[in-house]
Image: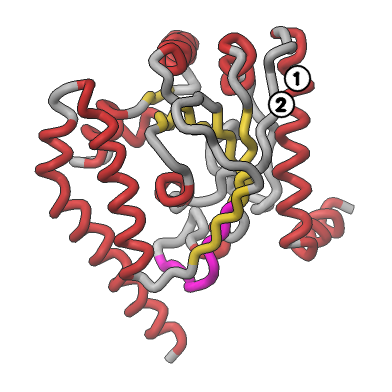
Amino acid sequence: MKNLLGKIYAGWCIFWFLLVFLLIYPFFLLFLSREKWYPYGHFLNKLWAHVVFAACALPTKIEFRFKPEKGKSYVYCANHTSYLDIPTLCYSLPGYFVFVGKASLAKVPLFGYMFRTLYIQVDRRSQKSRYETMIKSLEAIDKKRSLAIFPEGTIPNVNNPQMIPFKDGAFRTAIEKKVPIVPISIINNWKILPDESVIPRRMVMKAIIHEPIDTQDLTLDDVNMLKEKTYSIIDQELRKHHPEAFLEKVVESK
């Protein structure tokens, strides 16, 4: 019976996910036709996330430990454990920001056109793509936009919610443009919608927006320090909420 209810709930969530997207897609086509309208396209993604989370009766809790300033650029860095993480950031963060995501998202029918037009895509296997992504990220900051990046570069397929090492891109960008890094801990998505599953579980979707890390006095020699500090802030929060998961990893490694 429990399994049946889970499948019914999954079907309900998928129905609303697709329905809302298809209903707003004509407006995506309109707002993506001109760059000055891109913020409206991003707003549609925020609307999509809010409506779907509400329709799926998914409880949410967003904890702001600082208030982002309007008109100021940030580099938001979050842990990545689920395909739910992108809508989570759309739901959680204020204002217009640009995702930096993997190139495979641009190949998804319909969604791909929106993503590759509105956001920045990267193929981490290609040195040329990584270089172009860095240039586009720097240009986005110059346009007074914020960036949202999953610095792990992928969803780890083992040991969630334990993170894998961060890549340098987000931190080099923040230092070069002297904008703050904002760590974000996404607490339960690895349980709500695991990477290997299409059946969501109903529990609290929680995100913690940590205080920013200033980069004004940093140089590129400080990339590793900044990367480790960001990792540590997110890691400590995950350990606080899921100590049993990290204990299991320690036991398994012996």
Which amino acid lies under the numbered mark 1 shown in the image of this protein? Asn
Judge by depth and name the residue closer to the eye, 91 or 100: 91
Q: Mark 2 sits on what residue? A: 227
- Above or below, 240 against 164 in this view is below
How busy is the neighbourhood of tag 1: few (under 14 within 10 Å), some, or many (20 plus)?
Answer: some
The vertical placement of 81 against 98, above or below, is below
Residue 195 counted in the magenta span: no
> Which residue in the protein does label 1 denote?
224
- Could you tell me which residue is drawn at 21 percent across and 28 percent down? 37
Q: Is residue 104 visible?
A: yes
> Residue flagged by tag 2: what amino acid is it?
Lys
Which SS class for mark 2? helix
Residue 36 image point, x, y percent? 22, 22
Predominant SS along the magenta part: loop
Classed neighbour count for the residue bearing mark 2: other residues with Cα under 10 Å, few (<14), some (14–19), many (≥20): many
Q: Residue at x 34, y 47 (%)?
A: 46
Marks 2 and 1: in contact by CB < 8 Å? yes
Q: Residue at x 66, y 30 (%)?
A: 166
- Measured as percent of width and height from the top left, residue 86 is found at 43, 45
Q: Nearer the viewer, residue 198 or 63?
A: 63
Point out residue 238 in the picture as x, y percentages from the top left corner: 71, 53
Q: Secondary structure at mark 1?
A: helix
Q: Residue furthest right?
A: 254
Q: Which mark is residue 6?
A: none
Q: CA distance from mark 1 to mark 2?
A: 5 Å
Please state the extent of the stretch shown in magenta in the rendering: 199-207
In the image, residue 202 lies in the stretch drawn in magenta: yes
Q: Is residue 52 left or right of residue 208?
A: left
